[in-house]
Image: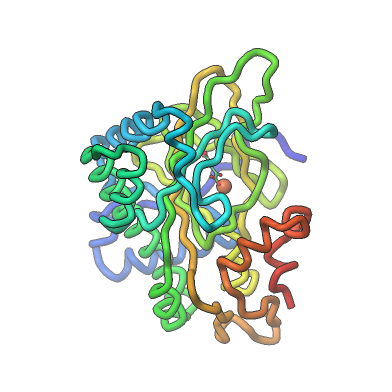
Amino acid sequence: MGSLTQPNLPVIDFSMENLKCGADSWAFTANKVVLALEEYGCFIATYDKVSLDLHNAIFHASKELFDLPTETKIKNTSKIPSHGYVGQEPIIPLYEGLGIENPTTVEGVQTFTNLMWPSGNDFFCETTLLFSRLVAELDQMVMRMVSESYRIENDYETVLESTTYLLRLIKYRERQTNETNLGIVPHTDKSFMSILHQRQVKGLEIKTKDGDWILIEPSPSSFIVMAGDACMAWTNGRIEPPSHRVIMRGSEERYSLGLFTFFGDRIIQIPKELVDDKHPLQFKPFDHYKFIDFYYTDEGRKSKCPIKDYCGV
Ligand SMILES: O=C(O)CCC(=O)C(=O)O
Ligand SMILES: [Fe+2]
């Protein structure tokens, strides 16, 4: 296995100024996106629609949330495994996370906010809504670029209708002496796409196909766009999700955020444009949420590649 921090992930500019320059720069960026996703399963997007003020506000809101008592936070439950409160897990004792379902809708953020603050918290509501909407726009730009490059725009239109989002707010508390430094175990995301954002404190590491772990530098304008397992099935294996982990090397607490996309209430077909003699069909049509249920069974957790075991041909 390789050592830490040699290669770097591609950095791709999604600032509006760049993309507005015309069709050429859109196509040029789309090409870079697909190459990066095929090579690394992820890339760093620089995205100026999320301002420094909003970056500061969302992490302020997140700190306010984690400062609530545990008995309040555990009220965040979901019928989907791991979409609600997760914390005090023996193998990752530093990790705590809460999930806001449908965070791009007023109803979604209000339901969550009212559960946490029965007398309301407008700052939290407005900040999480705005942040989620802007990051969802980035997700949809990336997805449009991927589907145009693969000429599967129609397939994307169909799945776009059933896209659902989950905003996860994450905190890794400071490590005590002799405690594990593992913030989150190496894994691939079960989402379709994930967009991660971190504040100051490093810790996120992403594995390349050569086995090197790349340490991702936090920056207020940087977003890590990462494919999940469902993206591998939909692209018939062209885009593979990268393994990633969090290691808490210092003593400071760490805050991060992830906007995860899922395709609900629909059987996802593998686009026929992505199947040919060189690329035989690798995945059967699948139901994304049933795949998540499968992942949380004993068989799913033990599997080396759950998406293949779930719907591989
Ligand atoms: O905290 C991070 O930077 C990564 C979190 C993560 O990988 C996840 O929630 O799936
Ligand atoms: Fe992850």
Residue 20 sits above or below residue 125 on the image: below
Outermost residue to the top: 177
- The residue sitting at 32% across, 51% down in the picture is 111
Residue 182 figure quarter = top right
Circle count: 0
Q: Say which of 204 and 297 sits in front.
A: 297
Q: Say which of 220 and 177 sits in front.
A: 177
Residue 155 sits above or below residue 2 on the image: below
- The residue sitting at 50% across, 39% down in the picture is 97
Residue 82 sits above or below residue 312 on the image: above
Question: Where residue 207 appears, x then y in whole percent?
Answer: 65, 45
Name the image colouring: rainbow
Residue 180 figure quarter = top right
Residue 104 figure quarter = bottom left
Location of the N terminus (image quadrant) = top right
| Residue 282 in view here | yes
- The residue sitting at 24% across, 62% down in the picture is 21
Question: Where residue 141 appears, x then y in whole percent?
Answer: 36, 64
Q: Say which of 306 and 81 sits in front.
A: 81
Question: Where residue 297 appears, x then y in whole percent?
Answer: 71, 58
